Amino acid sequence: MEKSVPDPPPENPANETKDRSALYRAIDFYLTGDQPTRPDELRFYNVSKDVSFEDTQLYVADLLRCASVTAYQCGDQLKGADRAMVYSIWHLLEIAKAMVDHSIECLGMKKG
């Protein structure tokens, strides 16, 4: 007669400890941020170390504005679900731009 449920694996605390330590090492590697980073020379685009935080925020605001206009114009040419999807992206870009604009305003308030 065949069993429908297999027997539980034999208990071996040494194996369990070994497996658990491997699990903890994997978690430490992937979740603690100790992963090796890519060298700067492998990036597609590098930012100069001399660019200030405010200049970076202004540049991001311009990029978001350009992406928003592009998405809006693309949406005008579409119909149905495709149009709705592109306008969803447009809305997300507008929200991101509003947040960046607000952070730029906050920077101005701190300076004054």
Image (cartoon, grey):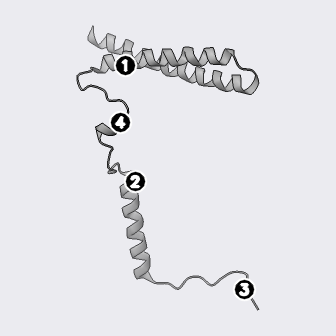
Closer to the camera in the image, 73 or 98 = 73
Query: Disc 1, disc 4: CB below 8 Å?
Result: no
The percent coordinates of residue 9 (x first, y second) are: 55, 82
Residue 97, percent from left and from top: 48, 18
Q: Which residue is mark 3?
A: 3
In this figure, which residue is indicated by the disc labeled 4?
43
Instruction: Say few, some or many: other residues with alpha carbon within 10 Å of mark 2 (under 14 / 14 to 19 / 20 or more).
Output: few
What is the secondary structure assignment of the residue under circle 4? Answer: loop
Q: Viewer-nearest of labels 1 and 4?
A: 4
- Estimate how packed mark 4 is, as few (under 14), some (14 to 19) or many (20 or more) residues with alpha carbons within 10 Å: few
Determine which residue is flagged by label 2. 30
Element on which disc 1 rests: helix
When the figure is inspected, residue 57 is found, relative to residue 5, above or below; the finding is: above
Circles 2 and 3: CB atoms closer than 8 Å: no
**Mark 2 to mark 3 CA distance (whole Å):** 39 Å
How far is disc 3 from disc 1 in space, using C-alphas? Answer: 65 Å
Q: Assign the C terminus to one quadrant of the image.
A: top left
